[in-house]
Image (cartoon, coloured by chain):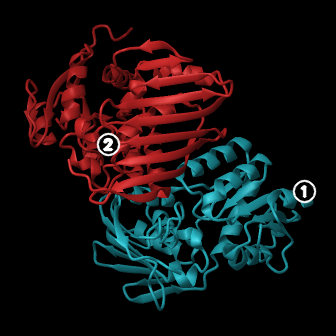
Chain colours: A red, B cyan
Amino acid sequence: MGLFGKKPLKIGLIGLGKIAVDQHIPSIRGNKHLELVAGCSPHTRPEGVKAYPDMDAMMTAHPEIEAIAICTPPQIRHKIAKEVIAIGRHVFLEKPPAATLGEAEAIKALAAAKGVSLLASWHSRFAPAVEATRKWISEREIKSITIHWKENVRQWHPGQAWIFEAGGIGVFDPGINSLSILTRILADAVMVKKADLHIPVNCDAPIQVEMDMMTEVGFPIRAEYDFLQTGVQTWSIFVESTAYEKLTLSMGGTELEIDGRTLIKQKEAEYAGLYAHFHDLIRAGKSDADFSPLRIVADAMLLGKRIAAPEYIE
Amino acid sequence: MGLFGKKPLKIGLIGLGKIAVDQHIPSIRGNKHLELVAGCSPHTRPEGVKAYPDMDAMMTAHPEIEAIAICTPPQIRHKIAKEVIAIGRHVFLEKPPAATLGEAEAIKALAAAKGVSLLASWHSRFAPAVEATRKWISEREIKSITIHWKENVRQWHPGQAWIFEAGGIGVFDPGINSLSILTRILADAVMVKKADLHIPVNCDAPIQVEMDMMTEVGFPIRAEYDFLQTGVQTWSIFVESTAYEKLTLSMGGTELEIDGRTLIKQKEAEYAGLYAHFHDLIRAGKSDADFSPLRIVADAMLLGKRIAAPEYIE
């Protein structure tokens, strides 16, 4: 298809923490169209990756790098993205794309002006049962959607203190995955109507959230986020049609059940899908930068009621 | 100019509270291209205005109304705007345009689809010294901008309890006026970097805010908002160039001082300017819906540090 004979796209990583090691490095290595050249981080040195203390050192040693994935915490993503775009490299942004909508929009404008590809990634959109869910919904009149996204922060985010700092968005960090699926499976815009934000007295971001949303068509969407779930996590979206049909998308989008029958149950390979998408965008000279999941979080923080929750200590 | 001989544009008001009485009614009456036909409100009956309990009653009695200004609290603006657009009338939204960015974007999409004009109004942009400030900045390298927007909530917002409720945005309600000026006088995008939000223990919205912003070019912007100012209010923006020139835009944009010399000192006529703009938009078949001031507030609420402030009792 025109890619035959093309050399693999050369990728560098900025940020070599948990998500880089768990997902980015194996996904790049598993894609024959991509080549992981090097990474940089002030601290971390994952085995088998050529690592440099910062981007300048990495790019001086490897000017052949064509595209860069930014896997740092969101608070510094805008500054780094700006530097990456300034040297004309394509950008893969981990989720959420930036600390604010203003920063995200600024990155988008800079990438467009420089003519590089930008992927604001939402890995959950690449879960195996998301597309079937989108199709099912598009063929029905929907009565309601309920989201339960509950996990143990101590298990899933060990040492990630930034998650509860200002700009870290707390339980919205996993919750935004459900919103990235929601905004993909619905054709209609989603609006926040009410949010209860439970914020530990020693933190700046919520640890539990109950949120009521509505679509323009008018059916209700309820989301319950909980970072203090123990035992097995729950990453489920329940959809009911006005004809009382029931769809359950569970395990983060990997399992699909309709009216009690399991139709899809697959291992996730989200980052493989993301990186294939990133490669396609670059080869096509396009970008994919939809910030609607972050807008929903910002809107929840804008109009939400703050409720003091007990101190959180990891 | 082609308008000669045209009949005045027929306007209806939804919401007949303080801002309608203080600004909308006299401004519409002062514009010969406009005609105030009627208004509606469940409670208020301002003298000299034909008033109905709700929009349906108003439109049944006066189907000739062509455009509607929505002067309700922001929490219900989206719902009303949707109804107004559905019957094909042009929309003037008081500021802020809606309770959330999602609602604001939805209104914009609906208006575009229906082919009606939408004005998301920011009255302070029509203050007499704003344009001269914009021009001065455009001709210089700027070193810093400082905003002091301080007023007594008890004096300026009597009885407006909604302002401290979830979605009411608190001291950002006046503060967003400074942001509407800021986003007009700068060509560059503005990003929130840090915000301290002082929220009374019995309220859901801040009463004092200190916020650090930055432009893409990289100079700092500091904003200090205070709802507990007593005595004279302060609505000032201080601009300093890298050549140490100093501009002060004060009294909400009505006074301009450069290097100690007063260049402009005029009475405000912002709503007159807004209504002239609304009329021009409708005659030209255009809209003006820039939500960047609300996006800055949402971003501040997204990444701001919440600090408990003493109970607020009006």
Tag shown at residue A245: none
Q: Which quadrant of the rendered structure holds the N terminus of chain A?
A: top left
User: Is the residue under label 2 in contact with that under label 1 (CB below 8 Å)?
Assistant: no
Q: Which residue is mark 2?
A: A228
Left or right: where B182 falls relative to B278: left
User: Disc 2 is attached to a residue of which chain?
Assistant: A
Image mark count? 2
Q: Is residue A265 visible?
A: yes
Q: Secondary structure at mark 2?
A: loop
B49 over A241 or under it: above or below? below
A63 over B69 or under it: above or below? above
Residue B198 picture location, percent across and down: 38, 70
Residue farthest to the right, as pictured: B61
Residue at 46% in and 53% down: A196
A250 over B73 or under it: above or below? above
Q: Please tell me which residue lies in front, B12 or B251.
A: B12
Tag shown at residue B60: 1
Residue type indicated by callout 2: Leu
Tell me where residue A117 sits by quadrant.
top left
